Image (cartoon, rainbow, N blue to C red):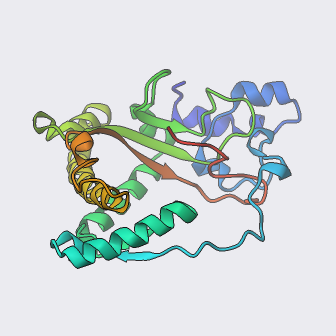
Amino acid sequence: MAIDCVSSIASMPHHLKDDSKDEQKHLVFDASVLKYQSRIPQQFIWPDDEKPCANAPELQVPLIDLERFLSGDPVAAMEASRLVSEACQRHGFFLVVNHGVDATLVADAHRYMDNFFELPLCEKQRAQRKVGEHCGYASSFTGRFSSKLPWKETLSFRYSAQRNASTMVEDYLVNKMGDEFRHFGMVYQSYCEAMSKLSLGIMELLAISLGVGRAHFREFFEENDSIMRLNYYPPCQKPDLTLGTGPHCDP
């Protein structure tokens, strides 16, 4: 549902009326307005039994240094795979350091993400995700659900590791947002390439930890297609009532 900047802000007081039907009819997730609201619309309030436990125990997540593994050190590969195996059997999480992804590229990716989500709503909606599609801008799934809405915005785009798709991300963002987003697209094209390369290395670690050939999983994903999703969780005046992302499972 596309709307202009003025109407989205001007209609905001109607969202806060007691009439729930009127609230649902006009509900728009405009982060630039909602982040200042002390009264949270009912659709964004989550039941207590679905909120995170405040006293949940901290996970002991291993820190895995990939530098020697990526350089081809067989001893480092065995030690890293052992840590990965333990983590996957216990809870499924581990952290990696010295992964080889350029720090400047990571910083640029964060900066361009912030710049996008700080745009006025009508500007972000130039990339509005259409019903049934996986790519584009979406704000809190207001068009899909009527309650327990997440307090977030997303921007998603497709990446392919195939050789003939070397400008896929750049082309998509320029097509949706205009030529001023060309460098944004170039940054995320490079970022996706770096993440794809890193993920293939981690696939090798998983294979070693399971006792199969190092390239066992890599062969399935070398020319992968994937979705890059940027999640933005705006400030909230009453964060104890909302969730950035609710309970879910990924395919």
Of 216 and 64, nearer the camera is 216
Which image quadrant for residue 29?
top right
75 horizontally vs 83: left or right: left
Residue projecting furthest to the top: 132
The image quarter containing residue 27 is top right
Q: Give left or right: position of 17 versus 242.
A: right
Give coordinates of residue 217: x percent, y percent.
Answer: 28, 47
Q: Would you place residue 9 above or below residue 104 in this image?
A: above
Task: Tell me which residue sits at (53%, 41%) in the image.
Answer: 250
Place of residue 219 in the rendered image (x, y in percent of width and height, measured from the top left): 21, 43
Residue that lies at the very extreme toward the front in this rendered image: 211
Q: Is residue 48 visible?
A: yes
Q: Please count the marks in the image.
A: 0
Residue closer to the observer: 17 or 152 = 152
Q: Quadrant of the N terminus?
A: top right
Does residue 218 appear to the left or right of 140 in the view shown?
left
- Residue drawn 22% across the image and 48% down it: 189
Evaluate whether residue 179 shows in this view.
no
Observer-nearest of 56 and 114: 56
Asked whether, in this view, residue 105 is left or right of residue 27, the answer is left
Residue ID at (65%, 55%): 35
Residue 95 % position (x, y): 43, 70
Residue positioned 66% across, 47% down in the render: 246
Relative image position of residue 38 (x, y in whole percent): 78, 56
Residue with the most extreme left position: 163
